[in-house]
Amino acid sequence: MLREPIFLEPVFKERIWGGTKLNKLFGYPIPSSTTGECWAVSAHPNGQSTVVNGTFKGTTLGELWAEHKDLFGTAAERSDVFPLLTKVLDASQDLSVQVHPDDAYANKHENGELGKTECWYVLDAEPGAEIIYGHTAKSRDELEAMIREGRWEELLRRVQVKPGDFFYVPSGTIHALGGGIVVLETQQSSDTTYRVYDYDRTDADGNQRELHLEQAIQVTTVPHVDAETSYKVEQAEDARITTYVANEFFTVQRAELDGSLTVEEADTFRIYSVIAGSGSLSLDGQAYPLSKGQHFIVPARSGSYRFEGNMELIVSWP
């Protein structure tokens, strides 16, 4: 078994709503001043992370998944594709209002793609920043009428956000990040998005982006249901562990560490993102320095390991 962490080089995506905060907050070498997405841990064909250390240096995560299933433990027994995708998003401007399909709909209509349930941990937010989360329609007929008539202010629910907030966004939820927000997103490994409304924006050639109203009306959950916001908080050694979600798609936790924390061996891999501070990871007698903005995988069944330092981590697993 591999007994070393797998550090990954992200892929960056330019978006019309992107900005420069991925560089300002994390020092990432972004390609332009409209960089919207850091695909930090990805085996999706549309943007794959690359290993930057150790035994598999230079290998893509997709290649690792295909050729070394043992690294991923029970997750590889349950899924044909690498199941998760970790991103950091910089919404310098409002994102389009969108909704994602579930597994069954995406498998049927999107060439076998996974559905897209996701969640956001808010890393940075300007004062007064808002997200769109859910809608007010009581029936699908009402939803369709409000969409086709453009009654957006009446239809869309807005929620103010601040750093440290967490939002679970299951498939079928109408949603959008507003301008001035940076989030760490954990999601199913899918790139299927149905755009509902884009503020009538146009590109440099005067063209509006494509909308997907028929699909959106079909897959949106009606009526909207807010996700559970009661989180489990526990103390483990010198770390405060908050579990935000634990379901059939993923478990997502935040570890606030001031000292040390030992993690026992697990039967599936773990994804870690350092969102604040610095420290180290000790695994199989080797110490690895950690700093804000790094993303890495601890392989399945690689023994217990230890974190030390003053830092915050987001950890997820399928």
Image (cartoon, rainbow, N blue to C red):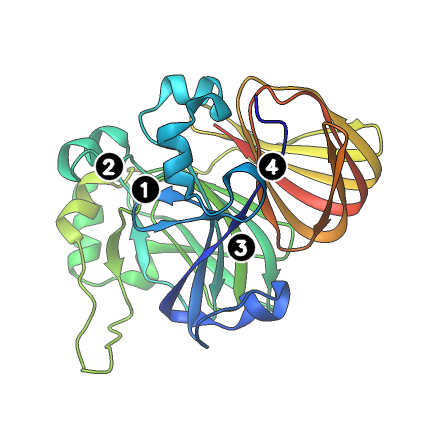
The amino acid at mark 1 is Ser
Label 3 sits on a secondary structure element that is strand
Q: Can the viewer see residue 206?
A: yes
Amino acid type, callout 3: Val
- Vertical relation: 284 (above or below) 314: above
Q: Nearer the viewer, residue 181 or 221?
A: 181
Disc nearest the viewer among 3 and 4: 4
Q: Which residue is mark 3?
A: 183
Q: Which residue is mark 2?
A: 113
Q: Give the vertical position of 281 relative to 131 (above or below).
A: above
Q: Is residue 88 above or below residue 250?
A: below
Image point (59%, 63%), residue name:
125
What is the CA distance from the residue labelled 1 to the residue labelled 4? Answer: 19 Å
- How far is mark 4 from mark 2, CA to CA? 24 Å
Classify residue 256 by image quadrant.
top right
**What residue appears at the point 52 percent right and 73 percent down from the top-left corner?**
20
